[in-house]
Image (tube, grey):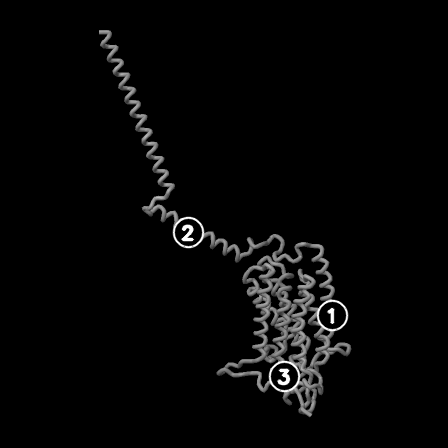
Amino acid sequence: MLSLSIPSPSEGVWMIGPLPLRAYAIAILIGIVVAWWVLEKRYRRKGGPAEVSLDVAVWMVVFGIVGARLYHIFTTPDPYFGENGDLTKIFRVWEGGLGIWGAVALGAVGAWIGLKRRGLRIAPFADALAPGMLLAQAIGRLGNYFNQELYGKPTDLPWGLEIDPENVVGGYPDGTLFHPTFLYELIWCLIGAVALVALERKFNLRGGQTFWAYIMIYTLGRVWIENLRIDEAEMVLGLRLNVWTSIIIFALAAVMFAWRTKVVRERDDADDIYLPGHGPQTDPDADSADSAASAESASSAEGATATSADSPTESPDSDNSEAEAFGESDRSAKNAAKHRASSATRAESKDENTETEK
């Protein structure tokens, strides 16, 4: 009988001279770029101002990475603070250990700061980002595959994952195959992204509804995938901490989705891009662009005026003005001639009277 399985990569790090090129970091970076690209397209389609997504994405990525690392450290403290813990591992992000919920929480704070500075609402921005987040999470799971980590329980299914002996946890014998949980989550996220966009179009989701629907889709899959994993984790009432986290966040997302649905039905401005009192005319970039355009227009007008003054070519308006001036001069000359003729006539009459008296 033919034995089937998914082989693990033989290498996850490639050296370029003295510099290591890590598959985990590449997967994360590609995921970030894809999420930003989706965000930019969707946000502009909603009416968002140009280049805002890139500026806000910087805030999100910085805050998100810090949040993801902190969440992992606090939910899996033993490798860092345990009996044989190593505090220097806290900074070795390339070795893995980024918690999605920390990334979402602090990433949202970063987005809020970046948007607030520009007078923009977070709900339409979050809706635009949601499908891209699922794609980024799918791509990021490839980093776990290359690191040979976060796999599931042993399995005899034909898609069982091979793991090198040095990366096996739990003391399982060589040749044991494991559930490829990275692949399960990758497929779940891709399907979830397609489903999310379809739901958004069918039910006209907006004003934050799409974002909370994304959270529900992701957590629904994370619950069963997390239950398959056998890597070290904090246990609470017989379940992994991340399972409880997913259940709680799913419930919270359902409540928030219902609330945003009520808001969208009752308020016409629920999906407005700008905060009250703000708009395209108050956007700093727009103001700068308008000022530059005004200055350019003024400069062009001055240049045109100067050119007209220096140019020997006469415009039709100047021809008319000269014609009017010549006409006025002609009339003045005629009036003067009439006045002289009248004066001469009166003088002749006076001489004739004088001669008669003599």
Q: How crowded is mark 2: few (under 14 residues within 10 Å), some or many (20 or more)?
A: few
Element class at badge 1: helix
Q: Residue furthest right?
A: 237
> Mark 1 is on which residue type?
Ile
Label located before the other in sequence (2 or 1):
1
Residue position for label 1 = 248
Q: Residues within 10 Å of mark 1 (few under 14, many from 20)?
A: few
Quadrant in the picture for residue 96: bottom right
At which x and y percent is residue 262?
A: 73, 58
> Mark 3 is on which residue type?
Gln
For residue 166, the mark is none
Seen in the image, is 38 located left or right of residue 305? right
Seen in the image, is 263 located left or right of residue 290? right
Label located before the other in sequence (2 or 3):
3
Seen in the image, is 78 located left or right of residue 17? right
- For the residues labelled 2 and 3, the Cα–Cα distance comes to 64 Å
Mark nearer the viewer, 2 or 1: 2
Looking at the image, is 186 positioned above or below residue 324?
Answer: below
Q: Which residue lies furthest to the top in this view?
A: 358
For residue 148, the mark is 3
Quadrant in the picture for residue 93: bottom right
